[in-house]
Amino acid sequence: MKKFISGFMILFLTMIVSLSANAAPGDLFVQLDLEAPLVGNDQCSILKVMPDGIFSEFVSFPTILALTGLDDCDMDDTGIAVARNGEVYFSEDQSDSVIKATPAGALSTFVTEAQIIAVTLEGSANLSNGMVIGPDGGLCFNDRISNSILKATIPGGVVSLEVSEAQVQAVTGFSTVNLQGGIAFDCAGNLYITDNPGITEEDRDSILVLTPEGTLSIFVSEQEINAATGFNSTDLDTGMTFFGDSLYVNDDGACDCVLKITLDGGISVLVSEAQITAATDNGGADLEGGIALNQRAQVFIGDDGDNPDDSNLLMSTSNGSSVSLFITTQELEDFFPGFDQPRLEGSIAFEGVDACIVADIPTLSEWGLIAMAGILGIAGFIVIVIRRRKVTA
């Protein structure tokens, strides 16, 4: 019986460790734009950041040039997404292509500019921040030249039109369309799209929603966002993601804040500019570096900095009560010597996140208490059973 108890305790502890591992937040992939006055040409990089903030270079400038055959690399207003199998898809602004990286970092061209032009019938392409893998496994992304949402099959990279400029014009009533911001799917398969037309000084931004049946409508308007934030200017041209029952959106306008928008249309400021500047010591925020949530619902924000233009990757608690530095501009400069102010102007994305599975994840100390209570309770029950058997024997 003692062997049984020991074996059971080992099994129980193994289960706890396994559950803790499955609740791990995963690695974060970060697009970085490198302005190089001391080097001579602009470069770019993708960092892989572990949950403890330790980072390494996942995709380097030379490997991108070896693939594209160009002299420069640009990850300003570009997108990134991570598939369930660990493949990373990202856009690059010089080649105007979508590139695929294996989990080991080997690169290949997934979608070429020529493929995009063949679908949009434009003279060129300009891929922007929006990029997400949909419920059907296809990769959706923005093209700013055609102002459309495109979809590429995975595998294969066969490109088709998901949302056209004409569809957006018909819904908004504006002739100007600018689909350069984030896109995101909810758990029901609805696709949310930010439109930043810039028609007047009041930039009539909106978030649109496309149902699985193909119906496009306005989800929230700029007027509704301004009423919630108290500002009179909204700029939804950077990042957006979905987690649980809400959209998380970078507002790079007067608010310079992170919005949380529930699926019933409730709008609130999750992280304010004041919270961001308190963490960075900058004179202002510039939320151009994307937004992503890990499985623990912690919010990560790419702040490109304002006065001075010092980029910092920030981490917020799920309720926005606490904002802290996750990667500092000094760490980025130390990692890339010779570059003047590495910039967070692209996008960020986590691996291994299921946005539709939301649960309270106990901390390690809580797991320890749970494990201890469970083991002691079961062991105590077995001891009582053994004593009863001895008494009745």
Image (cartoon, helix red, strand yellow):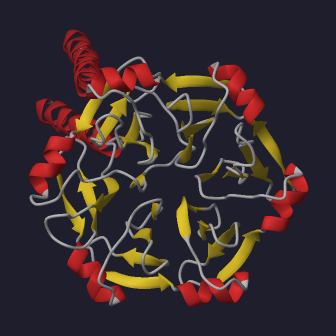
Residue at the far top in the pictured view? 391
Q: Residue at x 52, y 24 (%)?
A: 270
Residue 154 showing in the rendered view: yes
Q: Nearer the viewer, residue 333 or 119?
A: 333
Work out which quarter of the rendered image holds the N terminus and state it.
top left
What x and y, as percent, mark residue 146?
70, 72
Does residue 243 sit above or below 323 in this rendering?
below
Question: 168 left or right of 338?
Answer: right
User: From the viewer's perspective, is residue 373 above or below residue 152?
Assistant: above
Tell me which residue sits at (78%, 66%) in the image.
Answer: 165
Q: Quadrant of residue 370?
A: top left
Q: Is residue 346 left or right of residue 4?
A: right
Is 221 displayed left or right of 358 in the figure?
Answer: right
Q: Quadrant of residue 285?
A: top left
Give the mark count. Answer: 0
Q: Could you say which is closer to the camera, residue 361 or residue 194?
A: 194
Look at the picture and state if 364 lies above or below 173.
above
Residue 173 is situated, as x and y percent measured from the top left of the image, at: 89, 51
At horizontal 85% and vertical 66% (from top left) the residue drawn is 166
Across and down, in percent, residue 4 comes to 18, 35
User: Which quadrant: the C terminus?
Assistant: top left
Q: Position of residue 68 (x, y in %)?
A: 36, 86
Task: Identify the image quadrant of residue 20.
Answer: top left
Q: Is residue 363 visible?
A: no
